[in-house]
Amino acid sequence: MAKKFYGVGIPEFDVSALTGKLIVVEGCDGAGRSTQVSLIKNSLEHSGFPVTEVQMKQSELVGKELIEIMKGNVLTPQTMSLLYMTDFADLLENSILPALKAGFVVVSDRYIYTIIARHVVRGIDQTWLKNICSVALVPDLVIYLNAKPQTLAERIFHKYGTLNYWESGMDISTKNDVFENFISYQKLLHKQFLQMSKEYKFISLSSEAEPMEVFSYIEPLVLKLMK
Amino acid sequence: MISKIYPGKLIAVEGLDGSGKSTQIALLRRWLELGNYKVFFTEWNSSQLVKKITKKGKDQKTLTPTTFSLVHCTDFADRYERQIVPLLKAGYLVLCDRYIFTAFARDAVRKVDKRWLKKLYSFAHLPDITFYFNVPLDVALDRILSGRPELKYHEAGMDLELSEDPYESFKLFQGMIYDEYSALCKEFKLTVIDATLPPEEQQQFMRKQIERKMRLSDFVYKGVHRPIGPMPTHKAR
């Protein structure tokens, strides 16, 4: 499948030079994305393919600042979405595209869909967001992992002991109940992901099961892509 | 573009570096402040939050045309949502040294897609009046370059790889921006000021235009008269 951008893409960038593959793992917090990303990486490396892992908020340009700013909750959603996009564009141009050019498989933990979902539920215009996100490259494979909010919460409690302020949508709720907010916020996000599912060709998988069982559905898709 | 009706008014200045727009908007601000009007001034690329990021990107030269564009839009959105809009809603005269047209011109020169750019900034209210300071390219270049200042990398458009020499690069870059501005003037019907005229004449023209376009008596500050500080010093460019 020939590479292309969703829309305008990166000015004067030649996609035909991209020989690698882009695999995206999307899903809510606690859906098991990072576990599946590691499993994909292991499997590909085992078969002899070089792999680069990337994730949001890791860009050289704004990654650290974004995390700092989120501690303060001082930006409005529109500004926040632009900052996320800056982070994404930096990651795209300085990590993803160079790796794909070098023939690597890039496995991305989250992608533009998270930016769209998070900000649509905060009242930002979807068309406007999709337009900004049209600089993104169309991935070769998008896996959307989903699990019940209760499962997500349990996994997060198990791992961190506490629910994150943003992942509970505390900024958009008037209720003080973190758990209730988490459940309703995750439902809202899931709804947004489902709405995007067709347009962006997600492969939706339930991640209620054990990681290895989930991976048994993913692995054939990844291997098929590499043929 | 959104054109919501707010009780306040938005006044912007645009033009090349060296066109004298910052001097003129400072004089305008002074006039309005001394007249006890509700006035607020904001300049391009000045949001405290985004400043660090912009500086880092510029210092490390890792900004691409797309991230350059997004960083500046983030800066603008931050000022827009936290200052410009609330002040317009509160009935202020909001003065902007550079507005979205600066991004349209600079980013287009960096080959960012123009339709994408316009959609990117589509959340922004168009100014009630935008003064474009039209100055022949050689005059603007002379004003900036006569002191042989040290030109910053992005300021000189070095990222465009037009020339290895910063001065030569700056000239070519400014020429390209000039062409973009000329097109924007027509498209957005900007109010053109001949920036080669004596400064006081330009200022009189601006004041007249403003008085013609808005009823200034609506913007008188009714609170306690606050002491007015010294003339704000603006950094060039």
Image (cartoon, coloured by chain):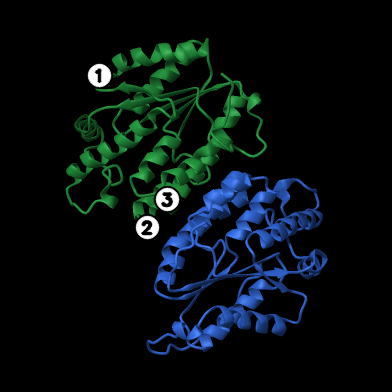
Q: Is residue A219 visible?
A: yes
Mark closer to the chain start, 3 or 1: 3
Chain in blue?
B
Q: Nearer the viewer, mark 2 or mark 3?
A: 3
Q: Is residue A209 left or right of residue B127?
A: left
Q: Chain of mark 2?
A: A
Secondary structure type for disc 2:
loop
Q: Horizontal and vertical percent for residue A94? A: 58, 36
Residue labelled with disc 2 = A74
Query: Chain A rendered in what hue?
Result: green
Q: In terms of image quadrants, where is residue B191?
A: bottom right
| Labels 2 and 3 positioned on one and the same chain | yes
Frontmost residue, B122 versus B159? B122
Residue at 47% of width from left, 62% of height from top? B80
Inter-mark Cα distance, 1 to 2: 38 Å
Q: Is the residue marked by circle 2 packed among few (<14), some (14-19), or many (20+) residues within 10 Å? A: few
Q: Name the amino acid, label 2.
A: Val
Residue labelled with disc 1 = A209
Q: Is residue A60 left or right of residue B185?
A: left
Q: Chain of mark 3?
A: A
Up-down: is B22 above or below A188? Answer: below
Q: Horizontal and vertical percent for residue A134? A: 52, 38
Q: Is residue A13 left or right of residue B35?
A: right
Inter-mark Cα distance, 3 to 1: 34 Å
Q: Is the residue marked by circle 3 packed among few (<14), some (14-19), or many (20+) residues within 10 Å? A: many
